[in-house]
Amino acid sequence: MSGAFDQLTPDRILSAVEGVLGRGMTGLTAPLPSYINRVYELQTMSGERLIAKFYRPGRWSREALEDEHRFVLDCTADEIPVVTPLAMADGATIAEDDGIFFALFPKRSGREMALHDDEGWRRLGRLVGRIHAAGARRAASNRLRLHPDSTTMPEVELLVGGGFMQRHQANRFRDVAMRIADVARNAFEGIDLQRIHGDCHRGNILERPGEGLMVIDFDDMAMGPAVQDIWLLLPGHAHDVRREIGLILEGYEHFMEFDDRQLRLVEILRAMRIIYFLAWCSTQIDDFRFRTHFPDWGGELFWQREIGDLERQFNTIQQAGNVHHEP
């Protein structure tokens, strides 16, 4: 299946899209940057620009992709600025070609939001609050649950058991990862999980002149704590950005209440994201594009650096204490 994914040709892409859209396409198939999926800009014969996203096989089931699209459509129904998947000739938003799922979206451009003042942070908070208000209305039973037992621990076992590092490094990695997981379990106790964007960094929030902010790329949506979509927006560690946290939550709480206990998760979630990214990379090592972008991945010096970063992050977790939101 990965071979078919790596060999998506322009002819195959255009044929697949024309077959489900019921419209003719020009020869434009401009690839767009994406490490995980294959994303292309296309053009209909009438001049409409579209984005075709071919999802990496084995990553998401059809049901999981339907959960993603349902979340985006719920946001659209609430007039939240997102890029809504297009309905194809059969009314569905997901199609399949040779075992590869794909979806189509209208092209929407914008620039990364620039933060110049306190109101900018409040705007971000209001946007995330609106997304979470839509997300709280239903669950996504086929998506990942962002919790140390359902995500982090399987990722640790994948990395340790996969032969990606030498034994002494694997032992050191497991030791710090288990300590992080133990702290995380206690911190997650009693915390509600809901539909979240999952990858809500500022690169996924665009400013459209004359329109405002728009959120893109719900590919990593999950059932998780609300603070996951907040800490990724922050310019530093939690204890250094209390003011920015307060401003974001000031905007956020116009639309959703925020459980202040979640602030203790910020540095824990940062550590979990490090482990998540390492585990994701381990599944991509045979991909040509990945090898091109990460040529030193998996070497002894690589693991020495990554494990050291994780140990330092664990120290940050221990030193962070409680971060409070002061209204």
Image (tube, rainbow, N blue to C red):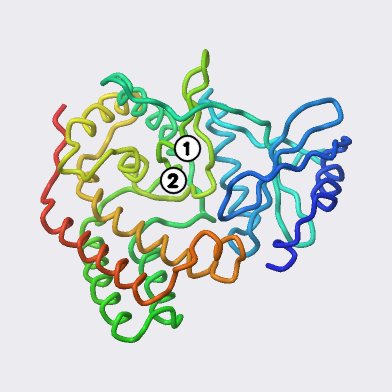
Q: Are marks 1 and 2 in contact (CB under 8 Å)?
A: yes
Seen in the picture, residue 102 relative to 327 is either above or below; the reply is below
Q: Which of marks 1 and 2 is nearer the N terminus?
A: 2
- Whether residue 40 sits left or right of residue 326 in the image: it is right
Q: Residue at x 36, y 23 (%)?
A: 123
- Where is 7 relative to 51, above or below? below
Pointer 2: what residue? 199
User: What x and y, as percent, mark residue 62?
Assistant: 65, 55
Question: Pointer 2: residues within 10 angstroms few (<14), some, or many (20+)?
Answer: many
x, y percentage for residue 33? 59, 46
Element assignment for label 1:
helix
Mark 1 to mark 2: distance in Å? 8 Å
Viewport quadrant of the N terminus? bottom right
Q: Could you say which is closer to the camera, residue 95 or residue 289?
A: 289
Disc sitting over residue 288 in the figure: none
Kindly tell me whether residue 82 is visible in this rendering.
Answer: yes
Where in the figure is residue 54, as x and y percent of width and height? 68, 51
Residue marked by disc 1? 204
On the rendered structure, is 127 left or right of 100? Answer: left
Q: In this view, does 157 lie above or below 136?
A: below
**Residue 180 percent location from the top left of the image:** 24, 65
Residue at left offset 21%, top offset 70%: 179
**In percent of the image, x 46 and y 30: which residue is there?**
112
